[in-house]
Image (spheres, rainbow, N blue to C red):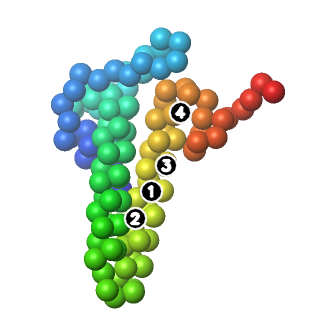
Amino acid sequence: MISLSVYNNRLDHDGSANGIGGKTRTKNNRESGISDIEALSTALREEQVAKEYYVKQASLMTDAAAKEMYLRLAEMEDAHYQIIEAEIDSIKGTGFWLGFPEFTMD
């Protein structure tokens, strides 16, 4: 997974993200001025692209060890995706963590 500073350097946005209840989180990268949400959204896209690449490479492999390696790399990209998604949920205050509600009122 590429660090957020790499994503921040690749983008040029003004950067603020709206959360629940109209709250705005404007924690920006000092150099580029992009928001955390923008950087993390870019990271999500990049993780998905990497996963698709590894899955495709696995399908082209005739060697079992090579196929297994690419599929493992795809799993790792999927894990990165889930971690980034959880961070976005945390920033936005959705009440979910890794796809599960943090608490219920039931």
Q: CA distance from mark 4 to mark 2?
A: 24 Å
Residue 23 percent across, percent down from the top left: 48, 14
Which residue has dot 4 on it?
90
Which residue has dot 2 on it?
74
68 relative position to 31: left or right? right
Report the residue at 72% width, 32% height from top.
103
User: Can residue 2 be seen here?
Assistant: no
Residue 42 percent across, percent down from the top left: 30, 41
- Extreme residue in the top direction: 22
Q: CA distance from mark 1 to mark 4?
A: 18 Å
Name which of mark 1 and mark 4 comes first in the sequence.
Answer: 1
Name which of mark 4 and mark 3 comes first in the sequence.
Answer: 3
Q: Which label sits in the foreground, 1 or 4? A: 1
User: Can residue 56 be seen here?
Assistant: yes
Which residue has dot 1 on it?
78
Name which of mark 4 and mark 2 comes first in the sequence.
Answer: 2
Relative to 38, is 2 above or below? Answer: below
Residue 82's disc is 3
Q: CA distance from mark 4 to mark 3?
A: 12 Å
Report the residue at 66% width, 35% height from top.
101
Task: Inspect the image, locate mark 4, and give the three-letter code of the amino acid beneath it.
Answer: Ser
